Image (cartoon, helix red, strand yellow):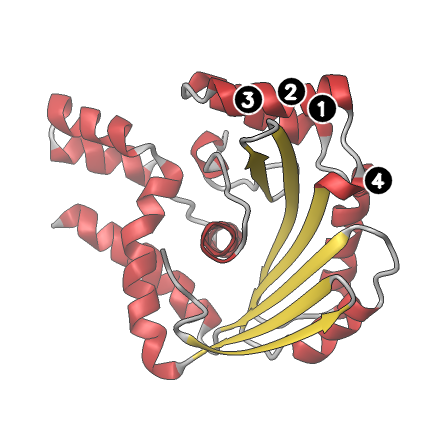
Amino acid sequence: MLNITDKSLVSDYSQGQHSFKNVKLKGEEFQNLVEELIEILPNYYIEPLSMASTLERLGKPAAAAKLRLKLPEVTKIRSGDVGEIITTDYIDEQTVFSVPIKKLRWKDHRNMAMRGDDVIGVLINQENQTIKFLKAEAKSNQSLSRNVLIKARDELDLDEGLPAPHALAFVAERLRETGSQAVADLIEKAQLVDGIGNNQVEHLLFTFTASNPETLQKEAFEGYNGNIKQSSVGFQVSNHQEIIASVYQGVLDGLDD
C-alpha cells in the first residue's frame, strides 16, 4: 500500500453525504512514493504467479522481456496508468470498497488506454450476499482544468451514473478466469437479475496533478446535483511529470540488474 494520506497534508470538506479531500504530498516523501510505486507497478501489469512461472521456466532475461512488453512507452499513457494505480491503491486502503481485478493486466496494447470505467470497486455484504459498487474516474494531468473535470463528470454520469454494463461484464469474466467465482456470481446477479439501483452505487473522482486542485475540484464537487453519493479526491504532487518518469525508469533499471 502507498499510504498517500500518511505522506501528505490532508484537508477534508463535506457537503451532505458527499465528501472532498485535498491531499498534498509532503516534499520529503517524494522519493518514498517513487520507490513504493516502483515496487508495486509490475504487479498491476502482470500477475505475480505468471511472472514467477516465466522466471522459473525461461530465466530472468525472458521474465524481464515479458514485463518490458507490457510497460507503456507513451508519456500520456504512463501518466494515465499511474493515475489509475494510485486511485486503485487509495480505494483499497482508504475506503470500504476493494478493487477485485487489476485491469491493466488485460490491456490489448501497452500504448493505448483501456475503454470503459477507469476503476470499479465492490463492497460485499457477506451476511445477505448483496453487493455495492464504486464507480471511479481517475484523471492524471500536470495542470487541472475545468474541461478535465467536466469530462470526468460526464463519464461518471454515463449509464445513468451506474457502472457501465460492459465494464461489469469484463470484471465478472476476468474474476471467473482467475477463480473468484463467488464475486463474479454476485456481480452477474446484480447486473442481470436484480438490477442495480442508485443506492448501490457511489462515485469517486480522483485527480493526480501538479497544480493545486482545491478550487476547481471543490467547485465541481459542489456543482453536483444528482443523488449518487460522491467522493472527490485531489492528490497534488508538485513533481508530477518527474514522478511518472522516475517510476518507469526505476522499473526498467531493475530489469537490467
- Assess whether mark 3 and mark 4 are in contact (beta carbons under 8 angstroms): no
Q: Read off the residue under disc 3.
A: 184
Q: Residue at x 85, y 67 (%)?
A: 223
Q: Residue at x 62, y 25 (%)?
A: 187
Residue 76: horizontal and vertical position, in percent? Answer: 53, 55
Q: Is residue 162 above or below residue 187?
A: below
Q: Is residue 143 left or right of residue 160?
A: left
Residue 40 x/y as whole percent: 32, 50
What residue is shown with label 1? 191
| Among numbered discs 3 and 1, the one appearing first in the sequence | 3
On screen, 73 above or below 150? Answer: above
Q: Amino acid at mark 2?
A: Glu
Pointer 3 and pointer 2: residues touching (CB < 8 Å)? yes
Which is more toward the observer, 179 or 255?
179
How far apart in space, not on screen, are marks 4 and 1 (Cα)? 14 Å
Is there a contact, CB below 8 Å, between mark 1 and mark 2?
Answer: yes
